[in-house]
Amino acid sequence: MDFFSAQDNARKKTKWLIFLFIAGILALILLTNLFLGMLLAFSSDSMTETGNMQQGASLFLSEFSWPRFLGIGLAVVLVVFLGSTYRTMSLSKGGKSVAEMMGGRLITGDGQNPGDRRLINVVEEIAIASGTQVPLVFIMENEPGINAFAAGLTTSDAVIAVTRGCVEQLSRDELQGVIAHEFSHILNGDMRINMRLIGILFGILMIGLIGRFILRSGIYSSAGRSRENNSGMAMIALGIGLAILGYAGTFFGNWIKASISRQREYLADASAVQFTRYPDGIANALKKIGASSQGSIIQHPDSAELSHAYFSNGVKSFLGSMLATHPPLQERIRRIQPRWDGNFESQSHAPRGSRQQPQTADTSPMGREKMVVTATVLAGAMDAIGQAGQATSSNLKQASNILSSLPQVIHQAAHEPYAARALIYALVLDTDRKQLTAQFDYLNEHADVGVAMLTEQLLGHVRSLPRKHTLSVVDMSMPALRQLSAQQYELFRKNLIQIMKMDDHISAFEWSLKKIVLHSLDLDFHQRFQPVSRYSSIGKLTHECSVLLSFLARETQVNEAAISHGFRAASNELGLPHVKLLSAGESNITALDTATDKLAQLKPLEKPSLLKACAACIAADNKVTANEMELLRAFSSLLDCPMPMLP
C-alpha cells in the first residue's frame, strides 16, 4: 500500500472508529437505563416488603418512562463527551504531551550519553531519508524493558519515545529496525488513530470513574448511618453498577483497540525491513525482548492507556491474547525470518555499533549556485512522489552521507535552540552586500543578544553547503526550534519574516522555507489544528491549482513561451479542463499562500496528481535545477506528503 492509500485508509478507519464509538455510547445508554430502572424497581417499598422478584420485574416494566430514558441517555452522552473532550484537549499539543505523560525526558544530539547521541543519529537518518521533519526524541529513563512508541497528530508534531532499556540493550542495527517500525506508524496514519483512541476510550472510562466515586461515597455513608437507612446501600449498589458498566465499555474499547493494532504491527515490521534492507535488525530486537526478563513491559501507571501504540506489548492482560494489542513475538519473528529456530537467544552478537556501510558522500562545496541536471530527474521525481512515505535503503544511505558530510559547526547549531535560530536566519540572508548589512543591523537591534553575531559566524558555512542539503538542515533544526519559549518563538518568527521582506522581494526559496518552518511551529506554539481533509475532488479547487501552477511556471521558466509550455505540461498531467495560466499579479506570493492553505485540505488520494503536475512543470524545459527540486520537496511538505530524497 502506498503512502496516499495508507493515509486514505487511516482516514476511513477514523470514521469506522467514530461509528464504533457511537455504537458503544448507545450500548452504554441502554445498559445504564436497564440498570437504573431495575435498581429503582427492586429497591421500591413494595418490592422491599414482598421480596417478589416477579412483582419487581412487572414494576420495572410498568414504570418505564421515555423521558427518563432520554434523560439518562443525555447524561451518559454528556459524561462521555466531556471525558473524551478533556483527554483530547490535553493531547492537543501533539506527541510531546503524550511522551511527557509517560515520564519521557527530551534528549538532543549534543548530549553527553553516547547511546542518546546514537539514537538521535538514527532518528535523523530515517527522517531525512523519508522526507519528514526530524521528530522530538524522548527517553523513558525508568523503563528497563525494550519498547518504543510514536505519538502525535501530524508528521510536524510527532515524537519518538524509547525506553532506557531499548537504548542500552540494542545494537545500532536493532535500534534502527525499531525506529523504522515507528516511522511506519507515523507515515501510514496509524499515529493519529492512536491519539484519537486515547481520547475516545477515556470518555467511555468516565462512567466507571464516576461509579467508583459513588461507591466510595456510599461506603462512607453506610458507615455513618443506621442499618434501617438503606440510602448508603443504594449508593453502593449504584456505584458498583456504574463501575461495571464503565469497565464493560472499556473492555469492548480495548478489544477494538487490540483488533485494530495487530495487523498494523505486521505491516510496520514489513515496512521496517523494506526500508533498512536488514531484516536481522528488527528480528533481533524482537528476540531480545523475548529473551529479556523485563521483556517489553512498561511500568508507568498510565501504560495501559497507550498500549496500542507500543513497539511490543507494554502491558500484561488478564485475558491474555484476547486483548493483546500486538501479535505474538514468535509470529512476528517468523514472518521476518521464516527459518528461525524458535530460540530467543539466537540473535546475532554483533558489536553495538552498526554494520559498516560504504560512505560515498560528496563533501566538496557547491556554493549556492543553481546546479543544472538533466531532465531524467523528472522520472526520479515522479517515482519519489509515487513512493512518498516509503523511503528505501538507498535513501537511508544518502541521508547517512549527508549527516556525515555536514560541517561540525552546522551539526551542533542545528541541535541547540539558541543557535538553530541563527542557522535559519543565515539560510535566508541576502547575497547583496548592502542588503546583507541592513539585515545584520536589524538582527543586532531586534534579535536576542548574541544571535546576530552567531548568524554571521555561521553564514560562511551555510553558503558552502550543497543547495540540495538545505532542507535536510532545516528538518534537523526543527526539534531545537520546538524547544523555544513562546516569547522566543514570537521574536524569531517576527525577525524571520522581516529580514525576508527587507529587499521587497520574497523568493520562492524564502517562501518555501518560511512556510515549512512557520507552518509547523505555529501548530505547536499557537495551538492551531491541522487542516481537515475536506476536499474529496481536486476539481473543486481549480482556481487554487491555477495559482500554484502559474506561480511555479513563472518561477522556473525563463520567458513567456517557456512559461506557457511549462504550464501546459502541468495542466495536461493534472487533467483538469478549466485550469488556466494566471498573470503574475494573480499568482503572487500572497495568492500562493491562500491557495496552498486550501490545497493542503485535499483528501490523500487527490494529492499525487497535483505533485506530479508540479514535477511536469519544472521539467518542461528539459532541465531541473537544485532550486526547483527544493521547491518541489517544499510543496510536498506543505501538502503533508513526505517525499523521499531525490538523487
Image (tube, rainbow, N blue to C red):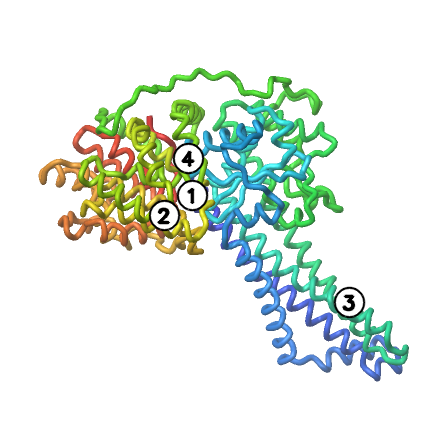
- Mark 4 element type: helix
Q: Quadrant of residue 149?
A: top right
Classed neighbour count for the residue bearing mark 1: other residues with Cα under 10 Å, few (<14), some (14–19), many (≥20): many
Tell me whether circle 4 and circle 1 mark residues in contact (CB < 8 Å): no
Q: Where residue 414 is drawn, which disc sits there?
A: 4
- Mark 3 element type: helix
Classed neighbour count for the residue bearing mark 2: other residues with Cα under 10 Å, few (<14), some (14–19), many (≥20): many
Q: Cα distance, mark 1 to mark 3?
A: 48 Å
Seen as rendered, the residue at the extreme right is: 227
- Mark 1 element type: helix
Classed neighbour count for the residue bearing mark 4: other residues with Cα under 10 Å, few (<14), some (14–19), many (≥20): many
Q: Amino acid at mark 1?
A: Leu
Q: Earlier in the sequence, mark 4 or mark 1?
A: 4
96 relative to 226, above or below: above
Tell me whether circle 3 and circle 4 mark residues in contact (CB < 8 Å): no
Q: Earlier in the sequence, mark 1 or mark 2?
A: 1
Q: Amino acid at mark 3?
A: Leu
